[in-house]
């Protein structure tokens, strides 16, 4: 929980700098791209997170890799994390930065998880009804989880609406066992 708080502070400061530079979207995209490049490869992840590797060496590699290819705010964020030995916060900072971006756009994250891929019309229809009902805009991501059998689970911020067949079966099972 402390890491989330620290990451939120970093993300807020970074978002402020990006906003001053009129580059919130660009900085967010660059942070995400750099985090993906670093953290999705085991070798680069170990290098970036290893406390025994000299800070100067990490800074050199980051400058060579991302210098001139990423917004200065994004690059300097990574360099600052290295200097402060806070490399482990990168993933959470990116997550918090994205949340701040959605907040600034007046949007809330919405994840639709279904047993099969939904058509764009189905997603649009669902989202339109939810936006009308809640009076909010949503940034939508879609996931497929075959174990749901049918229906969908909708996660809005910290709220879960479970309309899946597996969710209904679980609920039925709990009800039946609670009565015995």
Image (cartoon, rainbow, N blue to C red):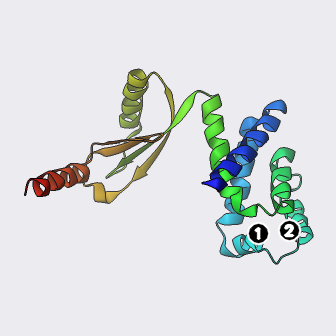
Q: How crowded is mark 2: few (under 14 residues within 10 Å), some or many (20 or more)?
A: some
Front-most of 124 and 78?
78
Instruction: Give coordinates of residue 152: x percent, y percent.
Output: 31, 45
Which residue is depicted at the point 73% across and 50% down? 31
Place residue 176 in its image quadrant. Answer: bottom left
Labelled pair 2, 1 in contact (Cβ < 8 Å): yes
Is residue 69 visible to the viewer in this orientation of the structure? no
Query: Mark 1 falls on what kind of element?
Result: helix
Q: Position of residue 108 (x, y in %)?
A: 53, 34
Vertical side of 88 occupied by 129: above or below: above
- Compared across the picture, whether 96 is left or right of 77 comes to left
Which label belongs to residue 138? Answer: none
Residue on which the image places disc 2: 58
Q: In the visual, does 169 lie left or right of 43?
A: left
Whether residue 103 appears in this view of the structure is yes
Mark 2 vs mark 1, CA separation in Å: 7 Å
Dividing the image into 4 quarters, which one contains the C terminus?
Answer: bottom left
Residue highlighted by disc 1? 48
| Mark 2 or mark 1: whose residue is earlier in sequence | 1
Q: How crowded is mark 1: few (under 14 residues within 10 Å), some or many (20 or more)?
A: many
Q: Kindly state the secondary structure of the residue where label 2 is placed.
A: helix
Q: Which of 28 and 3 is in front in this view?
A: 3
Q: Residue 41: x, y in percent?
A: 66, 70
| Side of 21 relative to 163 (left or right) | right
Q: In this view, does 163 lie to the left or right of 2?
A: left
Residue beneath the point at 66% across and 56% down: 91
Q: Which of 45 and 11 is in front in this view?
A: 11
Tell me where residue 37 appears, x and y as whole percent. 71, 62
Residue in the image at 62% along x and 28% along y: 105
Farthest residue toward the bottom?
Answer: 52
């Amino acid at each position: 929980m402390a890491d989330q708080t620290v990451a939120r502070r970093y993300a807020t400061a970074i978002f402020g700098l990006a906003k001053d530079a009129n580059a919130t979207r660009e900085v967010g995209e660059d942070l995400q791209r750099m985090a993906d490049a670093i953290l999705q490869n085991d070798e680069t992840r170990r290098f970036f997170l290893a406390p025994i590797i000299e800070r100067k060496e990490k800074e050199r590699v980051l400058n060579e890799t991302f210098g001139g290819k990423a917004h200065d705010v994004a690059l300097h964020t990574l360099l600052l994390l290295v200097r402060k030995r806070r490399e482990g916060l990168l993933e959470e900072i990116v997550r918090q930065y994205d949340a701040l971006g959605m907040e600034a756009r007046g949007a809330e994250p919405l994840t639709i998880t279904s047993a099969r891929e939904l058509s764009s019309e189905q997603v649009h229809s669902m989202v339109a009804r939810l936006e009308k009902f809640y009076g909010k805009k949503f940034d939508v991501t879609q996931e497929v989880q075959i174990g749901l059998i049918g229906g969908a689970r909708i996660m809005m911020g910290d709220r879960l609406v479970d309309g899946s067949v597996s969710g209904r079966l679980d609920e039925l099972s709990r009800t039946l066992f609670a009565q015995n």
